Amino acid sequence: MSQAKNKNTGSTIALNKKARFDYHIVEKFEAGLALTGWEVKSLRAGKCQLVDSYVLLKDSEAWLLGAHITPLKEASTHVIADPTRTRKLLLNRRELNNLIGAVSQTGHTCVPLALYWKGNKVKCEIALVKGKKDFDKRETEKERDWNRQKQRVIRDHVKQ
């Protein structure tokens, strides 16, 4: 009898929730990711973090820095695995030129929002963002709390 594989039911591998809190998202892009074999196996097991990662645009190429993919003991026995190595992002020339032009403006940067499966490929959702000020972050929290309160009131009103 074959054993059932422990598969991740959702297609999302990792989210960068802090990016949505710290930045105003201007534009989103979908990029491919150049990975090695052990990294793909680790991603299938869900061993990835995007918390302090960012996108570096250098020499007309995009690179993902700071993403931590934890190596599996079974998958990386014959290679020396670097969990935070720099990984190349695969974008077409038009998207790269758009990003490079926008990042050269003051206040704009590029951060990864999510890693997910698209078919059998790993894709990275990156975003062109502008930093939020402290009062913007407080306003976002107030709006989120108010939306929660509205949902509670509506739910309680429907029950009665």
Image (tube, rainbow, N blue to C red):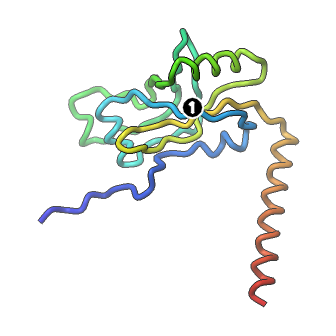
Residue lying at 59% horizontally and 42% vertically, measured from the top left: 16
Which residue of the protein is positioned furthest toward the left in this rendering?
1
| In-image side of 108 versus 72 (left or right) | right
Q: Position of residue 3 (x, y in %)?
A: 19, 62
Q: Is residue 61 above or below residue 42?
A: above
Residue lying at 51% horizontally and 26% vertically, measured from the top left: 64
**Quarter assignment of residue 130:** top right
Which residue of the protein is positioned furthest toward the front in this rendering?
94
Residue lying at 59% horizontally and 28% vertically, measured from the top left: 54
Q: Secondary structure at mark 1?
A: loop
Q: Is residue 100 above or below residue 83?
A: above
**Quarter assignment of residue 70:** top left
In the image, 55 versus 66, the foreground residue is: 55
The residue at which mark 1 appears reads as 53
**Quarter assignment of residue 20:** top right
Q: Position of residue 110 (x, y in %)?
A: 64, 27
